[in-house]
Amino acid sequence: MQKKVLIVDDSALMRRVLSDIINLDSRFHVTKVATNGLEAFNLLVQDHEVYDAIILDINMPKMSGLELLEQLEKNKVKATVIIVSTVAKEGAKETIRALELGAFDFVTKPDSFFDVKSDNFKNNIIDCLVVATKLYQESYKEPASKEQAVLSKINPIESLKQPVIPTIKEDRPIRKVPNSKKLVAIACSTGGPKALQQVIPLLTENLGVSVLIVQHMPEGFTASLANRLNEMSKITVKEAEDKELIKSGVAYIAKGGSQMRLLQDKNGMQQLSVTVEPARNGLKPCADIMYESLMQSDFSEITCVVLTGMGGDGTKGIKQLKEKKNIYVIAQDEATSTVYGMPKVVAEAGLVNEILPLGQIAGAILKNLGVR
């Protein structure tokens, strides 16, 4: 059965382009369009229309996308919303707010009509709809081997087709090193901005370590995410800068569109490398690259945290890091994940010490660091 989609956008051209993209895929059908949030609100709340997914613009007359999300939350209307947003500074800030209000994910709206017609934009829309409407579950195929299922998950959609493992807690003894240097490294994707808001603000002022975060986002959005988390948190949160020396009590978010590594400078100080380079497995920033860079650092105890997200990014990096360092791995559980991809893959690889609900992850980080 085709998935029903509602498009909400004040641009007639964008409504037509989005409708054409979606209707060309036989799995989806645009059943209604609305020119602003108020029209959409009437369809969803007053007329009780039900859609499998909603494509939502932000800046619209009468009722904006943010106002619509606020009204849906107020009226307890459940909806799977995908924001189609620009990369303008204000647009990035509003997109982060939309994710806070329960939007499933967002797709960057290109600046030019030529780019809107590109295959990249089309694929991003369809891929997001596939995950949002859980179509990947309907097309599940058994992996050829366990190794394929765990370590070869490059395609974000493919990585979600594997059977879900039970939520477990593994109390594997971890060797503690006296007077060790500690670090926290977090990876997340779809649902990550909202998940980070339930982790980073709960870390205490006396954290005493640096935190590195890779959140899959395009350029232009990570600064707004960092600023929002900084407003909410006791520790400092900022977007990572190239050649920046890391400090205790500061969380650094990898810059969208770039790769982040931790390197040692000529004086033995730990500094960040933020470079514009090709994507790995379609990702920039890529968590595997961040974790791999920690292999050469002088940190002896590293707490790795894998939160909600599509794909298997982070697993290969953590696997390599485990061969060199004393690591403790915490993964978010299925029930609280927006998409149970990244945490599931790292768990299936046998690398996880604890699988926990989102609300318990900050406490687990603090406990492992020995912070009270």
Image: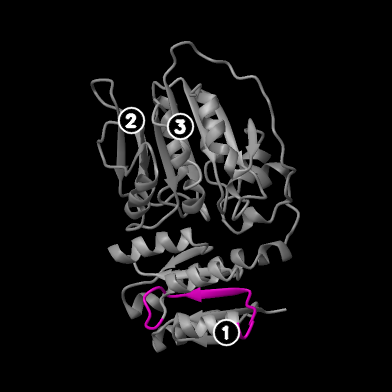
Comes first in the chain, label 3 or label 2: 3
> Crowding near pointer 2: few (<14 within 10 Å), some, many (20+)?
many
Q: Is residue 283 left or right of residue 86?
A: right
CA distance separating discs 2 and 1? 53 Å
The residue depicted at 30 percent of the width and 49 percent of the height is: 276
The secondary structure that most of the magenta stretch takes on is loop
Q: Nearer the viewer, residue 319 or 74?
A: 74
Say which residue label 2 marks: 263
The N terminus sits in image quarter:
bottom right
Residue type marked 2: Leu
State which quadrant residue 298 falls in. top left
Element on which disc 2 rests = strand
217, 168: nearer the viewer: 168
Label 1 secondary element: helix
Mark 2 and mark 1 lie on one chain; the one further toward the N terminus is 1
Question: Residue 123, relative to residue 21: is it above or below?
Answer: above
Q: What range is drawn magenta here?
A: 46-62
Q: Is residue 151 magenta?
A: no
Tag nearer the camera, 1 or 3:
1
Q: Amino acid at mark 3?
A: Val
Label 3 belongs to which residue? Answer: 184
